Image (cartoon, rainbow, N blue to C red):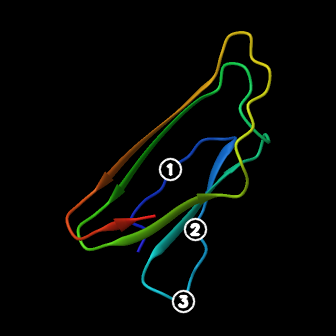
């Protein structure tokens, strides 16, 4: 079960219902990719004995960005948990 999720535009989290016990979360970027100045920080935690699937709707595009953009992902997986 997904305990919490927070994102600011243009990033969205889509959490469809599924037939199993795992939480499914898909990242969606409404802007179509990263543009100049975008900074994405993603922290994901799979708690003890949980199962989660983290995916995207498509590959992340990076558009021309003279000042740069970045994406950072931090994953924490507790004992007995699975994050795919």
- The alpha-carbon separation of the residues under discs 3 and 1 comes to 24 Å
Measured along the vertical axis of the image, is residue 43 above or below residue 45?
above
Asked if residue 61 lies left or right of residue 16, the reply is right
Pointer 3 residue = 19
> Which SS class for mark 2?
loop
- The alpha-carbon separation of the residues under discs 2 and 3 comes to 13 Å
The count of marks equals: 3
> Which SS class for mark 3?
loop
- The alpha-carbon separation of the residues under discs 1 and 2 comes to 12 Å
Whether pointer 1 and pointer 2 mark residues with C-beta atoms closer than 8 Å, the reply is no
Quarter in which the N terminus is drawn: bottom left
- Give the residue at x 29% y 68%: 81
Q: Nearer the viewer, mark 2 or mark 3?
A: 3
Residue 39 sits in quarter: top right
Asked if residue 82 lies left or right of residue 33, the reply is left
- Disc 1 residue crowd, few under 14, some 14–19, many 20+, Cα 10 Å: few
Query: For the view shown, which residue lies furthest in the left direction?
Result: 79
Residue 68: percent from the left, percent from the top?
Answer: 65, 16
Mark with earlier residue (1, 2): 1
Residue 45: percent from the left, percent from the top?
Answer: 34, 55
- Give the residue at x 76% y 46%: 30
Residue 25: percent from the left, percent from the top?
Answer: 55, 63
Whether pointer 3 and pointer 1 mark residues with C-beta atoms closer than 8 Å, the reply is no
């Amino acid at each position: 079960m997904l305990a919490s999720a927070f994102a600011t535009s243009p990033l969205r989290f889509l959490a469809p219902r599924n037939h199993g016990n795992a939480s499914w979360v898909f990242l969606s970027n409404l802007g179509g990719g990263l543009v100049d100045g975008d900074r994405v920080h993603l922290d994901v935690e799979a708690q003890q004995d949980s199962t989660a699937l983290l995916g995207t709707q498509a590959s992340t595009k990076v558009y021309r960005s003279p000042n740069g953009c970045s994406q950072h992902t931090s994953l924490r997986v507790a004992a007995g948990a699975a994050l795919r």
